[in-house]
Image: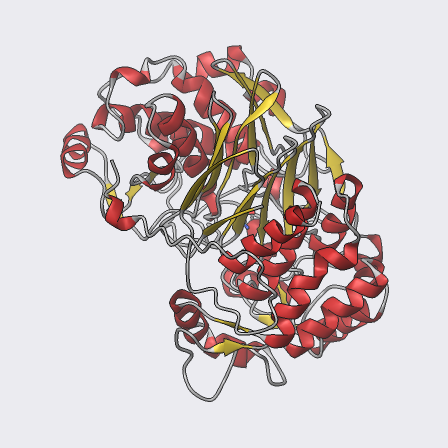
């Protein structure tokens, strides 16, 4: 069990936050159980509160998800965004399950050699920072399209974000440290003054006011998404792009479309899982691993025991090798989803597993890469009192994306181009490699790992779950589900117990610092290479018990927080 002293449960009973005076986000509600109340979990208490405010005003889960995303774009600039993209997996109380893809796209001027320099070298510095790294943003179009399921007017949904940007909010220690770390980049990539840089280092409790962003949000409130894709904001984006080496033109913005897709669906135990399919690899990886685990009786071993980790790692290795080979935007590359999740394929994939001995990754393909650590992107889980649920993962990719702020508009642009395979075999910032399926092509969506997920039991929502963390996203979501449903932990332990990750290449098990020593020793004896790394993900989970009580859990690894209707 997680020691309760780590669960800082500071429940603030007054929910009538006005967002205009003395906004104080320096508390976190880490766990809450309620009956027949809507709940929102996100990376920031003020953003969760913005969502919960919509629920209190009669809105549903989709209203709350939109308001939370917009508020995160203000109070969580490291990942919350209007200049990035995301995915929504939704369930309505009428029984409809859907997914909405508002992933960024490569600009029309992009091509497969865009990140190769004159010496034939892959330039990850170009794909990870500055104007060339920016994909056509999808978030505002995505939120506009989500309105199909929402109840409240757009202006109401955006109001908390405007107030937070205009009046400011007190930044957390984590945000202060990250802003200080990226100060050099903000100065390098931006011509004018940006809200994220000040004369002295940021510290916890400093007020961050974003006047330009407030104006931009006001414009979007008044004129809708078209202001972002056709109007004055679109022009500002193009101007910013043309200032340096950016590729996005007005046509890219005019042509951007969010896409409603069938969610990826598979059954597991007595439950139905609805998650994100291509252009995210997340849902396929999650399904493949769960199916492979089904071949072994995992519950006979302890949670995070060496045996359980060994089996899970072997399944992860196989699924991530498939990610590199087969997965990309289905509009550009063959969609192997059915094949990869078929019993025949899963059986053949698992044949090479031998209990007690690791299968070297080189058996699947020869390559060597080093994964970098990162926890960017951010997730929102919402369940309302009617049973509507929204699982949203949204991203700028790296911390603060490309670190490019649109001049005069005050918002950050993504560095999502790095999620393409910029050269076959060259690792991206998450250490993931890819090939043809995920090469850069004009108008194409870059492969993602985001795994916003809903689990239904008897057609009603049982779990809403997701996390940030680049390529660690599918394995984090997997562990949260496996902890809860195979090892029968509490929801809080399912989220907060130490995590591990394997992604085929590099052939290493990454683990958090508090991972059980005994398991690590046994895994080492089996022949695994182990590497301690920074905390993995920020999982936001909502679980409905058989008695109908809803428990929402915000990850203790960050400032994440639950808010209630
Ligand atoms: N940018 C992280 C992802 O989409 O997986």
The quadrant holding residue 261 is: top right
- Measuring from the top left, give residue 328's x and y in whole percent: 62, 38
- Measuring from the top left, give residue 215's x and y in whole percent: 73, 74
Give the quadrant of the N terminus. Answer: top left
Would you say 448 lies left or right of 468 here? right
- Measuring from the top left, give residue 417's x and y in whole percent: 61, 55
Would you say 466 lies left or right of 442 here? left
Q: In this rendered view, identify the residue nearer to me: 559 or 8.
A: 8
The quadrant holding residue 238 is: bottom right
Is residue 222 at all visible to an observer of this figure? yes
**320 up-or-down from 403: above or below:** above
Residue at the spot 21% in from the left edge and 28% down from the top edge: 306
- Measuring from the top left, give residue 130's x and y in whole percent: 58, 69
Q: In this rendered view, identify the residue nearer to me: 379 or 252.
A: 379
Would you say 437 lies left or right of 547 here? right
The quadrant holding residue 358 is: top left
Residue at the spot 38% in from the left edge and 27% down from the top edge: 484
Is residue 258 at all visible to an observer of this figure? no
Would you say 280 lies left or right of 515 here? right
Residue at the spot 45% in from the left edge and 22% down from the top edge: 290
């Amino acid at each position: 069990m997680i020691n309760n002293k780590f669960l800082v449960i500071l429940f603030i009973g007054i929910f009538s936050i006005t967002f205009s005076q003395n906004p104080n986000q320096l508390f976190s509600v880490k766990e809450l159980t309620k009956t027949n109340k809507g709940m929102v979990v996100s990376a920031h208490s003020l953003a969760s509160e913005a969502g919960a405010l919509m629920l209190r005003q009669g809105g549903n889960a989709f209203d709350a998800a939109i308001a939370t995303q917009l508020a995160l774009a203000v109070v969580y600039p490291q990942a919350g965004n209007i200049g990035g993209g995301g995915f929504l997996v939704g369930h309505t109380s009428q029984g409809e399950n859907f997914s909405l893809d508002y992933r960024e796209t490569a600009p029309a001027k992009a091509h497969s050699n865009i990140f190769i320099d004159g010496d034939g070298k892959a330039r990850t510095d170009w794909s990870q920072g500055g104007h060339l790294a920016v994909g056509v943003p999808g978030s505002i179009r995505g939120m506009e399209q989500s309105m199909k399921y929402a109840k409240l007017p757009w202006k109401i949904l955006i109001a908390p974000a405007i107030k937070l940007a205009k009046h400011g909010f007190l930044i957390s220690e984590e945000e202060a440290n990250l802003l200080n770390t990226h100060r050099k980049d903000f100065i390098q990539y931006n011509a004018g003054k940006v809200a994220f840089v000040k004369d002295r280092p940021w510290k916890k409790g400093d007020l961050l006011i974003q006047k330009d962003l407030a104006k931009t949000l006001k414009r979007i409130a008044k004129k809708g998404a078209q202001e972002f894709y056709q109007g004055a904001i679109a022009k500002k984006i193009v101007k910013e792009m043309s200032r340096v080496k950016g590729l996005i033109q007005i046509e890219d913005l005019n042509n951007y479309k969010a896409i409603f897709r069938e969610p990826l669906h598979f059954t597991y135990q007595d439950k139905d899982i609805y998650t994100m399919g291509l252009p995210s690899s997340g849902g396929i990886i999650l399904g493949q691993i769960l199916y492979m685990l089904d071949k072994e009786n995992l519950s006979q071993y302890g949670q995070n025991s060496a045996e359980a980790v060994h089996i899970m790692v072997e399944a992860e290795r196989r699924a991530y090798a498939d990610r590199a080979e087969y997965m990309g935007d289905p509009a550009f590359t063959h969609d192997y989803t059915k094949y990869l999740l078929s019993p025949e394929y899963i059986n053949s994939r698992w044949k090479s597993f031998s209990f007690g001995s690791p299968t070297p990754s080189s058996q699947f393909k020869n390559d060597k890469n080093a994964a970098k650590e990162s926890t960017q992107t951010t997730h929102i889980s919402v369940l309302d009192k009617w049973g509507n649920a929204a699982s949203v993962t949204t991203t700028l990719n790296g911390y603060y994306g490309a670190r490019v702020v649109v001049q005069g508009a005050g918002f950050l642009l993504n560095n999502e181009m790095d999620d393409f395979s910029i050269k076959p075999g060259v690792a991206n910032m998450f250490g993931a490699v890819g090939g043809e399926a995920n090469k850069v092509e004009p108008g194409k969506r870059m492969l993602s790992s985001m795994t916003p997920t809903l689990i239904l039991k008897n057609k009603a929502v049982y779990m809403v779950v997701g996390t940030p963390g680049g390529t660690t996203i599918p394995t984090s979501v997997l562990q949260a589900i496996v902890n809860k449903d195979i090892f029968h932990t509490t929801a809080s332990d399912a989220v907060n117990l130490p995590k591990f990750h394997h992604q085929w290449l590099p052939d290493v098990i990454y683990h958090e610092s508090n991972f059980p020593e005994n398991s690590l020793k046994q895994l080492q004896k089996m022949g695994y290479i182990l590497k301690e790394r920074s905390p993995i993900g920020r999982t936001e989970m909502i679980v409905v018990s058989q008695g109908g009580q809803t428990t929402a859990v915000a990850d203790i690894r960050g400032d994440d927080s639950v808010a209630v209707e």
